[in-house]
Image: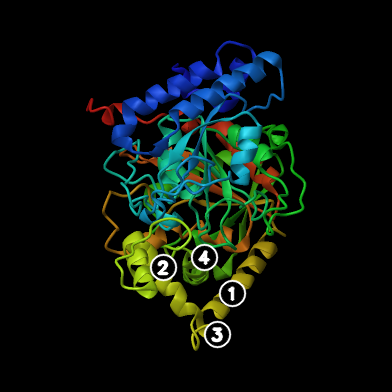
């Protein structure tokens, strides 16, 4: 097998044992990027020289056995929403096209401290607003399994890069499913941690009460290893939790006998793709075969999730994006018409259509006369949704749902229908509104060969349980071992 196809934990053993160097591994990934990314377009920026320099430093650490971690020497890519010192950070937007941060996000600091090699910055929906990566200001990313389909979003570049072996793993962000949904559509694993477990410092804000960083990888073990290294209290982030960080990998023993898995009827709805429903049903039987007990639970306020999300998220976005006005950083369009004219021109030319739509929705929801009817009411229903999960978890250890109601849809198919696009995240949004952890793992394929995802949701700060169940399911199935037919990207048919 080509070295770039190996999982991170397998590569860590080879690096530590001296079977391969970080430089050789990094060069292999750069070769893969050169071969296919001109077509796939997962990367906005490839950090070639910096990555090789970091790889040489990692090799020194490995030789001298200095501060070695499971990520030392590992080529990792970042969604282009994380600030990276001296490296362009666009957030997929023209308004930040030339922005080069003077500092690293905390997640980036922790990855570098662990000896990871930052190989590049990945494409995304502009300001993380989208479910297909078609809202990037620069170009859409393609799905490695079918170049005519989307990779999901907003972390579409992150999921596509992992799926096509253009990096060992990536770090994405999840505001309403933006790690889990693209992971499902690209046939990889995506973990959204508990809100506040991973620092948001240096992560460009979309919706501050919902945004969370997390790993995307080809197996559950790699997600668990990465979470241990990036999680933890950060004094630079006021929403960062004072919570213990576990050695999550040590809990992946494959034993889930006696664990209770909740099946919410509200997630098996009209409009669920029949092949998704079939794959999830078969997954339930696999888990029961492993000794888990599946029980029915109810999440009665699920039907309001999309409505609540698109009030809360857009309201917070309208506030967060007010800082992009052409004054301090980013794009500035000044044609001599005065300050207000500069504001208008900068924002008009700098923001894409979807970002403008959400800013307007959020500004309207927060405006005098409408705040009580919209934002305040949405916040109250959000509290009811949190209580639904608390009640459901009295009956079970984890909750099982589909990740996405459909497999990957065709490029351009939903661009003219925002509501249909928003419904792509119907099964992932509630997790963010409640602040709980969730993970998506591959659970099958359609007849057309498109990957499908299975989601596990856990109690607040109970990443251990969802990782444990996800890993046991992964070990009992073969779905995660499948690789996309990259010949399509290489023009071989």
Mark 3–mark 1 distance (CA, rounded to whole Å): 10 Å
Mark 2–mark 3 distance (CA, rounded to whole Å): 19 Å
If you read the primary sequence from the N terminus, does the residue marked by circle 2 or circle 1 appear first? 2
Taking the image as shown, residue 333 lies to the left or right of residue 228, namely: left
Mark 2–mark 1 distance (CA, rounded to whole Å): 18 Å
Q: Which residue is mark 2?
A: 358
Q: Which residue is mark 1?
A: 379
Counting from the top left corner in percent of width and height, residue 19 is at 57, 10
Quick one: quadrant of the N terminus?
A: top left
What residue is at 45 percent from the left and 43 percent from the top?
Answer: 88
Residue nearer the viewer, 123 or 302? 123
In the structure shown, which secondary structural element does the residue marked by tag 3 occupy?
A: helix
What residue is at 27 percent from the left and 55 percent from the top?
Answer: 413
The crowd level at tag 3 (other Cα within 10 Å; few <14, some 14-19, many 20+) is some
Mark 3–mark 4 distance (CA, rounded to whole Å): 20 Å
Residue nearer the viewer, 410 or 363? 363
Is label 4 or label 2 in front? 4
If you read the primary sequence from the N terminus, does the residue marked by circle 2 or circle 3 appear first? 2
When asked about the image quadrant of residue 476, the answer is top right
Q: Which residue is mark 3?
A: 372
* Label disc, if present, on residue 320 of the rendered structure: 4
The crowd level at tag 4 (other Cα within 10 Å; few <14, some 14-19, many 20+) is some
């Amino acid at each position: 097998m080509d070295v770039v196809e190996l999982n991170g934990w397998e590569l860590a053993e080879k690096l530590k044992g001296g079977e391969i160097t970080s430089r050789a591994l990094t060069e292999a990934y750069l070769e893969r990027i050169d071969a296919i990314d001109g077509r796939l377009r997962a990367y906005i920026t490839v950090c070639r020289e910096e990555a090789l320099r970091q790889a040489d430093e990692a090799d020194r650490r490995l030789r001298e056995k200095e501060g070695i971690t499971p990520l030392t020497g590992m080529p990792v890519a970042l969604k282009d929403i994380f600030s990276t010192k001296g490296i362009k950070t666009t957030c997929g937007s023209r308004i930040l096209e030339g922005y080069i941060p003077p500092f690293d996000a905390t997640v980036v600091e922790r990855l570098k401290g662990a000896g990871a090699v930052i190989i590049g910055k990945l494409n995304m929906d502009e300001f993380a607003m989208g479910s297909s990566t078609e809202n990037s200001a620069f170009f859409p990313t393609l799905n490695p399994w079918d170049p005519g389909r989307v990779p999901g979003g907003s972390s579409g570049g992150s999921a596509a890069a992992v799926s096509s072996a253009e990096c060992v793993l990536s770090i994405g962000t999840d505001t309403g499913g933006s790690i889990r949904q693209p992971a499902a559509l690209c046939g990889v694993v995506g973990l959204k941690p508990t809100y506040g477990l991973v620092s948001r410092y240096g992560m460009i804000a979309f919706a501050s009460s919902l945004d969370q960083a997390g790993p995307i990888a080809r197996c559950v073990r790699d997600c668990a290893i990465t979470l241990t290294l990036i999680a933890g209290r950060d004094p630079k982030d006021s929403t960062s939790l004072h919570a213990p960080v576990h050695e999550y990998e040590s809990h992946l023993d494959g034993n889930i006998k006696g664990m209770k898995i909740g099946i919410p009827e509200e997630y098996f709805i009209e409009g669920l793709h029949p092949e998704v429903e079939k794959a999830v049903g078969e997954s339930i039987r696999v888990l029961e075969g492993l000794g888990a007990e599946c029980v029915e639970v109810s999440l009665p306020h699920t039907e309001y999730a999309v409505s609540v999300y698109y009030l809360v998220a857009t309201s917070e976005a309208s506030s967060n994006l007010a800082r992009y006005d052409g004054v301090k950083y980013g794009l500035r369009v000044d044609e001599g018409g005065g300050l207000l004219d500069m504001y208008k021109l900068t924002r008009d030319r700098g923001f894409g259509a979807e970002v403008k739509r959400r800013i307007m929705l959020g500004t309207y929801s927060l405006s005098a006369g409408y705040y009580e009817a919209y934002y305040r009411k949405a916040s109250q229903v959000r509290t009811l949704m949190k209580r639904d999960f608390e009640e459901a978890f009295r009956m079970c250890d984890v909750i099982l749902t589909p990740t996405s109601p459909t497999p990957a849809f065709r490029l351009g198919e939903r661009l003219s229908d925002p509501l249909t696009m928003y419904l792509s995240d119907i099964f992932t949004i509630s997790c963010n509104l409640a602040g709980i952890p969730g993970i998506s793992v591959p659970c099958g394929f359609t007849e057309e060969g498109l990957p499908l995802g299975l989601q596990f949701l856990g109690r607040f700060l109970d990443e251990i349980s969802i990782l444990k169940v996800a890993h046991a399911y992964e070990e009992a199935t073969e779905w995660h071992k499948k690789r996309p037919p990259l010949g399509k990207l290489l023009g071989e048919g």
